Image (tube, grey):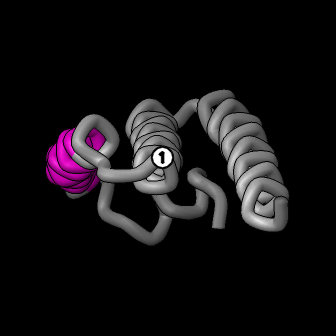
Amino acid sequence: MIASELFFIMNVAEIPLFTRSAIFVLGLALILAFIRMVKGPSITDRIVALDTMAVIAISIMVLYAIKTQNALFLDVAIAMALVVFLGTVAFARSFERRMID
C-alpha cells in the first residue's frame, strides 16, 4: 500500500494525531536502542542495536512522508533500507568467517 492510498483509508483529521503518537513511540524506541548500543556487552549486541536504530530512522522517514504527502521520502527510505540490509549481511558474513577461523 502506498502513502497516497493510505490517505483514502484514514480520515485526514486523524493523521496528525497518528503521526505525532507514532513518532513519540519511535523516539522512545530510538533512545532505548541507543542505550543498548552504548551499553551492549558484545559487539553483536551493538551491531543489532545500530541496525534497530536504522530501522527506526527509516520508520520515521516513512511517517514524515505520510505527513507531508511527499513520495520522495519513501524513495529515500527504501534506499536507506537497502543499504542497512547490505551492511547487516556484510557484518553477518564477516562474523561467520571469524567464527570458522
What residue lies at 78% left-to-right and 63% top-to-bottom? 96
The span shown in magenta is 15-35
Residue 3 position within the rendered picture, expressed as x and y whole percent measured from the top left: 57, 53
- 99 relative position to 45: left or right: right
**Res. 23 in view:** no
- 3 relative position to 100: left or right: left
| Quadrant of the rendering where the C terminus is positioned | bottom right
**Res. 29 in view:** yes
What residue lies at 50% left-to-right and 54% top-to-bottom? 44
Query: Farthest residue toward the front?
Result: 101
Residue 55 position within the rendered picture, expressed as x and y whole percent measured from the top left: 50, 49
Q: Residue 76 or 36: which is nearer the viewer?
A: 36
Q: Is residue 101 magenta?
A: no
| Quadrant of the rendering where the N terminus is positioned | bottom right
What residue lies at 63% left-to-right and 39% top-to-bottom? 77
What residue lies at 67% left-to-right and 43% top-to-bottom? 84
Q: Which residue has dot 1 on it?
A: 43
Give the overall secondary structure of the magenta segment. Answer: helix
Under mark 1, the amino acid is Ile
- 62 relative position to 53: left or right: right
Residue 63 position within the rendered picture, expressed as x and y whole percent measured from the top left: 41, 44
Q: Residue 71 or 46: which is nearer the viewer?
A: 46
